[in-house]
Image (cartoon, grey):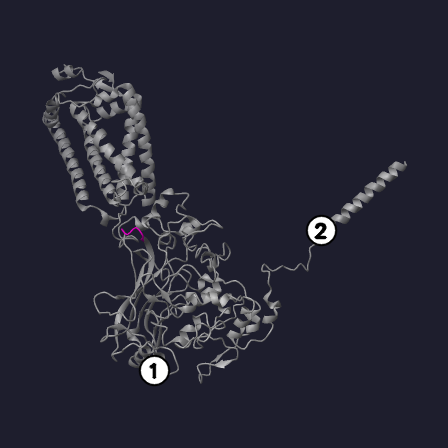
Amino acid sequence: MARMYIFKRFERFWHWAQAALIIFMLLSGFEIHGTYAMLGWEKAASLHTTAAWTLIGLWLFAIFWHFTTGEWKQYIPTTKNIAAVMKYYSVGIFADAPHPFRATQLSKHNPLQRLAYLMVKLFINPLIWVSGLAYLYYNDLAASKIPGLADLELGSIAIVHTAAAFMMLAFLIGHLYLATTGHTPLAHIKAMISGWEDVHEEPQSKLSREAA
Amino acid sequence: MRTGILMVAVMASMLLVSTAQAAPAPAPEPAAKKVSKSTADHSKFKALQQEFGSGPEVTKACLSCHTEASKQLHKTEHWTWEYKSPEGQLLGKKHVVNNFCTSVASNEAACNSCHIGYGWKDDKFDFSSEVNVDCLVCHDTTGKYTKPGGFAGNVVTKDTEFPPGSGKIVRAINLKAIAQKVGKTSRATCGACHFNGGGGDGVKHGDLDSSLESPEKALDVHMDAEGYNFACATCHQTEDHKVPGSRYAPTAQDKGEAHLRGKEYKTIPTTCQACHGQAPHKRIAKLNDHTDKVACQACHVPTYARGGIPTKMSWDWSTAGQRGPDGKPLIKKNAEGHVIYNGIKGDFTMAENVVPEYIWFNGRVKYTLREDKIEKGDKPIQINRFEGSANDGKSLIWPVKIFRGKQAYDPVNKTLAVTHLAGNDDSAYWTNLNWEKAVATGMATVNASFSGKVDFIETESSWPITHMVAPAKDSLRCHNCHASNGRLEKVRDIYIPGRSSDHLGLLDTAGWAIAALTLLGVLGHGIGRIVLGKRKK
C-alpha cells in the first residue's frame, strides 16, 4: 500500500492543539454558562480565558503559516464535484463505493470539507473570538464611549458567544464522526497524527484524477 | 623602654575611656517614663481638678479650653437628631418612625441616654445650650462613663434608686476621674450607642455589635485589635466634629480615586474606595471589572452578625401583652438563651452569621414618615426604601439587612403610630400593656390625630451592611453569585454568567437540539455503515 505525505508537521500540531483547546473550551465554556458544574466556576472561567489566549496565539501562527506556505488555497470553496461527494456520503458510503475524491498534497480536502472548514474559519471562529473578546473586555467597551459598542449589553454579547459555541459543538460532532469515514475507521485519524495517508492501489476514479 | 611604658599607659587609658563611655549606655532605665502620645495630660488641668456634680459642669470645664467645641457639635446630627434629606424629607431620630421601638418621641427619657447631650426629656430641650453637650460620652477612655436609660441622657453622680420604689440602685460614676482621662474616640465609645441601636447589643444593624470592640482579624480586617486596630474614626474621618458616613444619605457608589494626604477631594473619606481606589484587586485583575456594578461590601462582608452576637431579624409587636403566671410580662427564651418573646415587646427572631439580601442601591433612601398615609396590603410598608436600579448609572449591588416588623398603626387615620413605651406613668405601654393608652399619649406628643383604634401592620426596614469586613480569603467566591439560585438570584436587569435565569431559553433549547440532532444523524449514519458493510461481507 502506497503512502502519501499530506499533513505537514506544523499543520498536525496546529490541528491537535486546536482540537484539545476547543474541546476544553466547550467543556469549560458551558460550565461558565451555567449548564453544569465540573471544575468550579472560578477555575473554569480562569482556564477558559487562558485557553482562549493560547488559541489566539496559535491562530496567529497558523494564519502566518497558511499565507507563507500558500496552504490557504486549500480552503478556496468550489462547487465542482460537490454533488458527487454529497452523493457518496449519502449513498455510496453504504455500498462501499469508492470515494469520488482522492486527497493529494495540493488538494487535501474534498469540496464538502473545504466548505465546512471555510465556514468554521470565516464564520464560527471569528464569531467566537469577537464575542469572546467583547465578553472579556466588556468593561472597557462600556467605558470606551464608542457609539454602538459602549452600550452593548453583556447579555447580548453572551448570547452571540453561546450561539457560536453551539455551532462549534455541532461542527465538532460532525467532524469527529466524519474522521471515521476513511477506508478504515481510523485511517483519517492516523493520517492526521503521522501526516501519511494510505493510498489504495485501486483504479483511480475519473474524479480523483481530475482533482489531482 | 620609656616609650614602651608610655604606649601601655596610653592604651590602658584608651581602654578605660572606652569602657567608661560604653558602660552607662545599655543599662536599662527602670524608671524610664513612657511619654504620653498626647501633648496634654488632662489630669494636670486646673479646670478638671474639681468634683463635678453633673455632666454640664464637666462640659463647662471642657469649654474653658475647647471654646468652639459645642458650637461645632450643635451643627451635627449627633446633636440635632434631625436631618433634611436631599429628597426634602425631614428625617433623623427626632422624626422618623422605625420598626424596632418605633419612635423617640414620647420616650425621650429612655431613648436619649444615647443623645450626646444632657437632659433631653421632652420637646422643651434647649438645643442652643453649650453646656448641655456631652463631651465625655465620646471622649471617655476609662470605660466607666455610663448614661443609664431613664435619665434623659443625664449621668448619675449619686447612687439613685431607679425606677423609684423598685429597690434597684443605679450606681454613681466619678466624673472627675473620667474627665481627667479624656482622649480620642474609640470603638468602645462610638459602640456604646451604635452597637446597641434598636435597644440592645447587635439588635439593629447586624454589622455593628460589641464583638467589634476588640475584634479578631476574621471578624474585621481593619478593626482587628491585634492588627490594624482601626478606630471608627479611622474611616469616619471627622472634621469639626462632623462625622462623615451618613446612613440617611449614604454614598452607594464612589467613583473617586484613593485619597492622598493634603489633597482636596469631593468624595467622602469613609468609603472603601477612599483608600483602596477603583482597581484594588492585584492578583485576579478580572475582579476589578466588578467594581462598576458590585459594592465592595457585597463580596467582602460574606455574612453579618459574625461576632457571636445575634441580630434581630424580625419583631412582631402584635403578640405583645402576655403575662406570666406571676402577673409579670411573659419572657420566652430559645435554646441559646436569647429572648424570643417578651410580654412588653412581642415576638422576635434572632440570627447569627446572616447572609445579606442584595439589592440595587443608589444611595437615595425614601422614608415612610409618620404623616404618610399607609394602607394594609399584600406587601409590607417600607419604613425606608432603598432606591436604585441596574440602569440609573448610580447604583451598585449592595448587601442589606432587611428587618421585618409588625407594628402599631392607626387603621382609621391610616398612619404609623407613635407609641409611648417607656415611662413611669399610667399610659406607658411597658408599664400597663395597654396599646390604646400608649398610642394616644405618643400621638399627642407629636400633635398627631389618633382615632383611638390600634391595629398592626407589616413593615420592612433596610440597613446597609458595610462593617465586619472579612479577610480576602473569606470573601465570596465566584460561584456564590455565578450560579443559579446564588446570592444574586433576585438581583435583576443584569446578565450574570452562570445564572440560568439570564439565559435566552430559546437559544439553549435550539443549541442543544441541533447538537443532539447532529449526534443522532452521525450515529444513524454510522450504524448504517456498519450494518450495510457487514451484510455485504
Amino acid found under the numbered disc labelled 1? Ser
Q: Main secondary structure of the magenta part?
A: loop
Magenta-colored stretch includes residue B393: yes
- Residue B45 lies left or right of residue B394; in this view the side is right
Q: Nearer the viewer, residue B437 or B344?
A: B437
Q: Is residue A49 visible?
A: yes
In the picture, residue A124 is in which quadrant?
A: top left
Q: Which residues are magenta?
A: B391-395
Q: Which residue is mark 1?
A: B427
Residue B524 lies left or right of residue A193; in this view the side is: left
Figure quadrant of residue B399: bottom left
Question: Which residue is painted at 58% across and 76% down in the image?
Answer: B51
Of B217 and A16, nearer the camera is B217
Q: Amino acid at mark 2?
A: Ala
B201 versus A71 height, above or below: below
Do we see residue A92 in this rendering? no
Q: CA distance from mark 1 to mark 2?
A: 75 Å
| Label 1 Cα neighbours within 10 Å, binned few <14 / some 14-19 / many ≥20 | many
Q: Residue at x 51, y 74 (%)?
A: B56
In the rendered image, residue B85, in percent from the top left (x then y), is placed at 34, 63
Q: Name the subunit of mark 1.
A: B
Horizontal side of residue B205 vs A21, given as left or right? right
